[in-house]
Structure formats: C-alpha cells, structure tokens
Image: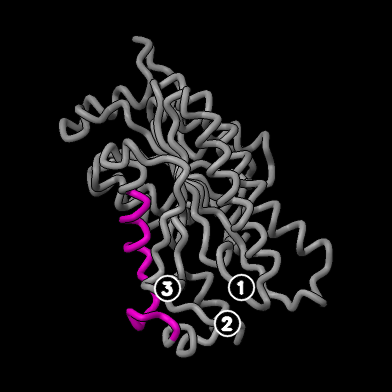
Amino acid sequence: MRPCSGLAIRGRRLRSATLTPGGTRPWQRRHAERPYHRLVARRTVVITGGASGIGAATASRLAEQGWAVGILDRCSDVAAALARRLTASGAVAGAYVADVTDPAAVDAAVAAAVHELGPMRGLVRCAGIPGVSPAAELDDARLAAVVDVHLGGTVRAARAAHPHLVAAGGGAIVAVSSIAGRVGFAGRLSYAAAKGGIDALVRTLATEWAADGVRVNAVAPGFVATPMIARQIELGEVDEGARSARVPLGRFARPEEIADVIAFLASEAASYVTGHVLVADGGATAAWRE
C-alpha cells in the first residue's frame, strides 16, 4: 500500500478500549454524551484504507450521517488525525492500525473497533495499491502483491466483519472495485484482474450471506482524483487530459462523489440491493474504446 509517515504497528488500537468500573464500554459512554448519536448508537462502520482518498471521503460522509466510524489503515498518524477531526466535529470515530495482507491484524483491528465503537453494521473495503506494468514485464512478486492487497484484503476484511455483522442482526459490505475489472485496460493487468475478482467475490458472498442478513455490493469507479492517482500523474503513468477526454462528463470524479454512492449502498435505502456492482464512472464505460 501507499507509503506512510510514522510507525504502523499491526493490529494495535490507537485508543483505549477498556471497560469502566460500572461495566460500560467506551462506545456506550461516548454515545450517551452525544445526543445526536443516540438513535444510531448501534451502527458502526469499519473502513479499510480509510485514512485517505475514497476511504477518507467515505469516513467523513458516513460520520455526517450518524455512523460511528472505525478508520482501519496502516498509516497510523494519518488515520489518527482524521479520527480526531471527525471527533472534533461531533462524530464518533476511532483509528485502528492494520495491514490488510495480515489476517490476524485485520481480525484484531475489526474486533477492537467493535469493542470501542459499538455493534458493527457496515464494512467498506477501500484499501489498495497501484498496479501499473505492461503484461510482458509484470513479475510474479508484483502480481501477487497487487492481488493480495485488493482481492485478498477484501476477503480478509469481509471474513473478519462477518461474525460481527451477524451478531448485530445484519448489515452491509461495500467493496471498492473499478471499471478496470469490466473493460480492457492496457498496462493494468494485475490491478484489473484483482478488481474483476472483487466483482466475482461480491456476487458469491451476496448469495452465501443473504440468509445471515448481510448485503454485499461494490462500487466500480472510473477515474477519481485521489492521492494515488495524483502520484501516478506525477510519475507519468496517467495522462489526466487523455483520461478526462474519455469521460462523457469530461472530468475525474471527486472522492466525495464515490463516497455518496458507497453511503447509499451501505444504507437502508439500498435494503433490497445485494450482489450488485454499481458503476460510477461519469459515463466512461458507456463510451469506452481502448
């Protein structure tokens, strides 16, 4: 995943999750102190890769809607800073450190978020790394790394979340896929394969976990103005002008626009939607040509 400043300790909570002498958990105390959140005190979402880009925008949007937000990221300082900003605005938020390639760390971080913030009703899987290479030059190590973060990370996060979602009476999982998993995308073999795998995973888990009250969907963005894309533009791996020209709406998406789609899929407004990959690409795939 992206480089991080500061130390990232796998599976470490950034805030205490101890019980008070009276037996109440931290999430119960904080919700009681914030009347705005009383009606949604039992609605926690965990967001992997939640410290920047689409993940951070989603954390902000869901916090605005009353969710308690667990920001799971390997960038401890950035995640903690976002959690502090959300808390200062009156939201309930916590930061948890984990690398999505480490199953034990993901399990521990999700469990810590539930313990501290309250029963889990949502998971948003955003963590990702770039995968740019001509197919003939793609080595096995890079292929494995990209697939492990995107597809493997989605499996691990969903697996860690499932028992908590079931215990809370059901909920929603939303994965961030990509139009790269749906159309030909030269130079993006590892990334496209991983995103196509996420689409298949969504359909499979939606079928398997429907009886548990767990909905599973994905959003497939097109070109989004995230820090990861900004870095690729800087390195010359992405031509912003050429990409924008391929989008009927004529521009990259803002992370907040993708966050709005994720918020819909996580909400009760999408209560009859599962196994679906919602494309949010400004019309790019409708007019696609390689």
On whether residue 104 falls in the magenta region, the answer is no
Query: What residue is shown at x 45% (from left), y 19% (from top)?
Result: 167
* Residue 290 % position (x, y): 57, 82
Name the residue type under label 2: Glu
Q: Residue at x 65, y 78 (%)?
A: 186
Looking at the picture, does residue 207 appear above or below residue 256? above
User: Helix or strand or loop: what does disc 2 sit on?
Assistant: loop
| Front residue of 93 and 157 | 157
Provide the residue designation for mark 1: 184
Q: Nearer the viewer, residue 159 or 119?
A: 159
Q: Which residue is mark 2?
A: 290
- The disc placed on residue 162 is none
Q: Residue furthest top?
A: 22
Q: Which residue is mark 3?
A: 286
Contact (Cβ within 8 Å) of mark 1 with mark 3? no
Q: Which residues are magenta?
A: 246-263
In this view, the residue in front, 217 or 155, is 217
Amino acid marked by disc 3: Ala
Q: Is residue 185 visible?
A: yes
Question: Quick one: label 1 or label 2, which is nearer the N terminus?
Answer: 1
The kind of secondary structure element at disc 3 is: loop
